[in-house]
């Protein structure tokens, strides 16, 4: 069997095809190598960045552990010390406030007792007795002292003692139960039992509305509400005193207390009007003097 030679045209076509496809193959091979190199370079950069980030995070954690926590612990200790100091100051202030309130209650009670004595009038002066008293000689009239004249004839009773503003003071209470009820409520106020004191004084005013102690009882109701920081109820109680007993010597003090309650409620304009009303109606009272001082400060 003999081989037949290929035609010249077929050989030429094969050579031409080989020349055409050889650069494409080399180009494809070059592109794959370049892409792999770039991927490897990118992976290396990523690895390096990740390593740098890990190092920085580790450094920050170490700094927080060594410095931040120490500083935070120091700040916490300082706060504990400040809280302890403030608690001590609060305890001292609470003690001083309690003492001040006690002194204020005692002052109120003392003033009330003095006003009651003035309103009730002074009793007859006691007779002079004792070792220093003069003795009557033998045969002298009974009750006459040595070197003195016989006692004068009885005279008419003196008019009642005038109260605040020139008004006659009310007579002292007669019924023992009336005085006992008032004193019981007053003792409750002095002890700081303001709720019981309010109930006691309210019962007293209801049971003895014509008593000379009724204005004082109504006045203490307002003060008890003020001690409870119920300023609106305190104002209502003092207004009731001024309306029901306009001639009482307690009214100027009641108006002064109303002005104080209005300040506590944040109504400075109403407080000023109340102080001006007090000065206009009771210009010579001690409460009016305090009202002028308050207006001068403002």
Image (cartoon, helix red, strand yellow):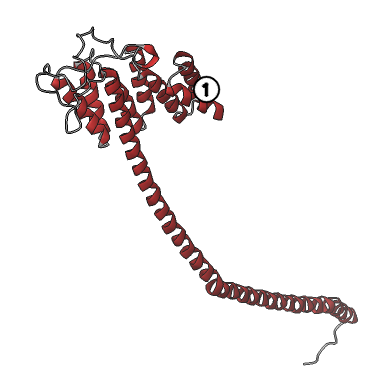
Q: Quadrant of the N terminus?
A: bottom right
Depth check, front residue: 163 or 281: 163
Quadrant for the C terminus in the image: top right
The residue lying toward the viewer, choosing from 247 and 45, is: 247
Dividing the picture into quadrants, the one containing residue 150 is top left
Residue 87: image quadrant is: bottom left
Residue lying furthest left: 139
The residue shown at (38%, 12%) is 166
> Residue 41: which quarter of the image?
bottom right
Report if residue 1 is visible in the image.
yes
Residue 220 position in % (x across, y down): 30, 26
* Furthest residue in direction top, as rendered: 156
Whether residue 230 is situated above or below residue 7 in the rendered picture: above
User: In terms of depth relative to the viewer, which is nearer, 224 or 216?
Assistant: 216
* Residue bearing the label numbered 1: 269
Q: On the rendered structure, is 209 left or right of 280?
A: left
Tell me: 44 left or right of 150: right
């Amino acid at each position: 069997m003999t081989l037949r030679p290929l035609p010249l045209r077929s050989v030429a076509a094969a050579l031409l095809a080989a020349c055409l496809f050889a650069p494409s193959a080399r180009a494809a091979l070059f592109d794959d190598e370049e892409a792999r190199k770039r991927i490897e370079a990118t992976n290396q950069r990523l690895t390096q960045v990740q390593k740098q980030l890990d190092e920085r995070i580790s450094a920050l954690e170490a700094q927080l552990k060594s410095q931040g926590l120490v500083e935070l612990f120091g700040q916490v200790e300082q706060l504990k010390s400040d809280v302890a100091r403030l608690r001590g100051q609060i305890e001292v202030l609470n003690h001083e406030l309690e003492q001040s309130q006690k002194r204020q209650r005692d002052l109120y009670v003392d003033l009330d007792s003095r006003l009651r004595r003035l309103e009730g009038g002074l009793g007859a002066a006691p007779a002079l007795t004792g070792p220093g008293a003069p003795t009557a000689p033998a045969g002298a009239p009974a009750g006459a002292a040595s070197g003195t004249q016989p006692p004068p004839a009885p005279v008419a009773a003196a008019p009642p003692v005038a109260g605040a503003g020139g008004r006659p003071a009310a007579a002292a209470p007669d019924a023992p139960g009336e005085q006992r009820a008032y004193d019981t409520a007053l003792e409750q106020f002095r002890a700081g039992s303001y709720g019981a004191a309010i109930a006691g004084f309210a019962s007293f005013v209801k049971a003895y509305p014509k008593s000379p102690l009724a204005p004082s009882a109504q006045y203490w109701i307002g003060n008890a509400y003020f001690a409870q920081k119920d300023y609106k109820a305190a104002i209502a109680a003092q207004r009731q005193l001024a309306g029901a007993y306009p001639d009482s010597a307690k009214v100027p003090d009641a108006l002064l207390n109303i002005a104080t309650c209005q300040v506590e409620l944040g109504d400075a304009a109403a407080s000023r009007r109340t102080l001006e009303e007090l000065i206009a109606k009771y210009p010579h009272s001690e409460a009016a003097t305090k009202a002028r001082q308050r207006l001068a400060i403002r």
